[in-house]
Image: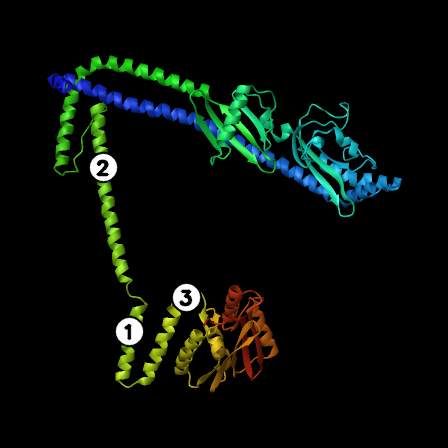
């Protein structure tokens, strides 16, 4: 309350000075907060993006190495000549000199070429199950050569091993300083059991090049599922603790790269788990120094802004009058807006703070007008949608009601044939437009066909009779909707109509074991063997070139629907005799009706 009274007692220019200083301080504080927050976030995101890039590189590199190892291993395991040599060696059989020379000059050379052509591989070797084998350098060795290898003493011999050295030979022959990752796979044969071991290896620096990059602020390790940690050099206990904590914190994280902001450290971490290797590659980068540098810049900025505000506050009073002139102009405009005049704008607002206020007012008014126009447009669209919805109210029920009215008019005029036709048409439309998610019963299909035949007889001078012989137990048999009508329609159009005489369509249903058979036979013109063969090809979909009036398209669609519904073993078959008949038989699984 005292502060308010003191402020009221100040002169107007002092009030404006205080207000302007506060108005300047607030946006500067917000700007500084947002600016340095964004700088910090940009630094974090940059490091995360760099980490993500390195992660993707590592994934690609590891996948390439794994694929090379797996492909080479499978190639060695599938080498039948090598298997035969190892089997014979295990069984105590010795190869002749000619066989050894031929084996080395062909199979061994091919395997050596495979390994040498892949720069990612360090070696791929086979250690026989025993020592009764002729060693062939770089590829085939006796069992005793593997006894000095690190993975041989491991309880889990098969699978991946990391950080091992090549101790199969003396240091004169191999570089024992190279740290290797190798995949050990047993080679077996049905005659002799395990006949050897395939060891495919790459350098750790090839598989995990990031482990060997020297960077004081970034530490990279590979942590196996058994808890062993592999790194290029010795890491301090403090760094190892940070790595373990980061691994436990983010090994199940959904994001690929994570940022941890602690009290004393700021870390960017990614944990890349590779199931094929049985372990995780962990990248930890310490960006504490970089973030602390940003915090220092923020403190310097705040001090400089405070000094600057104090300095400019002495000059504000001298320009208050000019600012008041603009202020009253803006106040006048705001009063007009308050009376509902949104077309008013502040003219020549200037470039100072008051001018910025006038500019912001103009921008706000422009946005308000745009929003009002958009709202009016949305309301118009809503009204148009409502009108269109009202126009679409005419639906199937309207059609049924109109047909009922026409039927009543026909009955009043004693036009019973027209009335019956309209009844059949109504039932036809109701069945066609009725939504059915599954199959329908044979009885429903037959009722639809009866109405269809009734309408067909209005069209032609001749009469199409319908003979139905379907037992009660098959009336409820389920079939795809509209699967019988296309067959009846084809029978009329292509079998009966060309004759132009009274004919009959016979529909018969029987059971055959676990199947139901529906036969549709017409007494039309039939087909010769060539026409029948062509129709069968059309139904099977093996003949795509059809004439405009071909009768195979509808039957082909029915065939596809039956097979999609019941399986490939079901469907239709067609038989015919020229100038006699055409019969279509449909075989579907028989399902007894409940009750």
**Residue farthest right in this picture:** 97
Q: Whole-percent x and y of residue 315? A: 21, 14
The local crowd at label 2, few if under 14, some if 14 to 19, many if 20 or more residues have their Cα within 10 Å, is some
- Residue at point 24%, 45% (across, down): 375
Gap between marks 3 and 2 measured at Cα: 55 Å
Residue 56 vertical placement versus 13 (above, below): below
Q: Is residue 500 visible?
A: no
Q: Secondary structure at mark 2?
A: helix
Q: Secondary structure at mark 1?
A: helix
Image coloring type: rainbow
- Residue at point 66%, 40% (across, down): 70
Q: Residue under circle 1?
A: 402
Q: Residue under circle 3?
A: 436
Residue 520 vertical placement versus 559 (above, below): below
Q: Quadrant of residue 119?
A: top right
Mark 3 touches mark 1? (CB < 8 Å): no
**Residue farthest front in this picture:** 595
Q: Whole-percent x and y of residue 445? A: 44, 74
Q: Whole-percent x and y of residue 35? A: 35, 24
Residue 149 vertical placement versus 98 (above, below): above
């Amino acid at each position: 309350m005292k502060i308010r009274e003191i402020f009221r007692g100040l002169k107007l220019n002092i009030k404006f000075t205080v207000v302007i200083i506060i108005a300047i301080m607030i946006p500067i504080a917000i700007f500084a907060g947002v600016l340095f927050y964004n700088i910090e976030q940009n630094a974090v995101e940059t490091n995360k993006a760099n980490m993500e890039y390195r992660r993707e590189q590592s994934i690609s590199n590891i996948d390439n190495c794994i694929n090379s190892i797996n492909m080479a291993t499978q190639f060695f395991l599938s080498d039948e000549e090598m298997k035969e040599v190892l089997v014979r060696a295990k069984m105590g059989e010795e190869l002749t000199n000619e066989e050894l020379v031929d084996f080395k000059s062909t199979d061994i050379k091919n395997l050596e070429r495979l390994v040498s052509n892949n720069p990612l591989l360090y070696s791929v070797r086979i250690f026989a199950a025993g020592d009764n084998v002729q060693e062939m350098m770089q590829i085939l060795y006796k069992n005793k050569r593997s006894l000095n290898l690190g993975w041989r003493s491991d309880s889990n011999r098969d699978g991946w091993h990391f950080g091992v050295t090549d101790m199969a030979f003396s240091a004169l022959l191999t570089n024992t300083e190279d740290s290797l990752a190798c995949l050990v796979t047993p080679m077996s044969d049905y005659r002799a059991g395990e006949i050897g071991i395939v060891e495919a290896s790459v350098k750790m620096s090839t598989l995990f090049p990031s482990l060997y990059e020297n960077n004081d602020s970034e530490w990279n390790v590979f942590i196996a599922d058994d808890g062993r940690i592999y790194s290029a050099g010795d890491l301090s206990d403090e760094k190892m603790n940070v790595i373990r904590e980061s691994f436990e914190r983010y090994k199940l994280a959904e994001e690929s790269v994570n940022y941890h902001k602690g009290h004393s450290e700021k870390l960017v971490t990614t944990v890349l788990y590779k199931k094929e290797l049985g372990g995780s590659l962990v990248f930890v980068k310490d960006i504490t120094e970089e973030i602390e540098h940003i915090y220092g810049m923020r403190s310097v900025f705040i001090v400089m802004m405070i000094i600057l505000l104090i300095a400019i506050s002495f000059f504000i009073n001298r320009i208050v009058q000019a600012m008041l002139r603009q202020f009253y102009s803006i106040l006048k405009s705001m009063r007009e807006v308050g009376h509902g005049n949104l077309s008013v704008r502040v003219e020549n607002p200037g470039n100072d703070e008051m001018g910025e206020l006038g500019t912001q007012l103009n921008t706000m008014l422009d946005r308000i007008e745009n929003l009002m126009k958009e709202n009016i447009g949305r309301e118009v669209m809503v009204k148009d949608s409502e009108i269109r919805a009202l126009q679409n109210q005419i639906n199937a029920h309207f059609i049924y009601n109109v047909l009922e009215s026409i039927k009543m008019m026909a009955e009043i005029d004693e036009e019973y044939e027209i009335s019956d036709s309209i009844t059949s048409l109504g039932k036809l439309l109701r069945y066609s437009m009725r939504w059915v998610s599954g199959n329908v019963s044979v009885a429903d299909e037959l009722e639809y066909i009866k109405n269809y035949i009734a309408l067909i007889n209005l069209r032609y001078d001749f009469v199409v009779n319908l003979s139905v012989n379907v037992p009660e137990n098959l009336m409820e048999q389920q079939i795809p909707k509209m699967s019988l009508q296309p067959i009846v329609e084809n029978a009329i159009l292509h079998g009966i109509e060309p004759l132009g005489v009274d004919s009959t369509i016979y529909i018969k249903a029987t059971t055959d074991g676990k199947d139901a058979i529906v036969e549709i036979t017409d007494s039309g013109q039939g087909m010769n063997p060539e026409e029948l063969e062509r129709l069968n090809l059309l139904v099977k979909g093996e003949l795509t070139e059809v004439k405009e009036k071909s009768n195979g398209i509808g039957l082909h669609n029915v065939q596809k629907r039956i097979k999609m519904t019941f399986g490939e073993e079901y469907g239709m078959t067609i038989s015919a005799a020229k100038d006699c008949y055409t019969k279509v038989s449909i075989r579907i699984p028989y399902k007894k009706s409940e009750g």
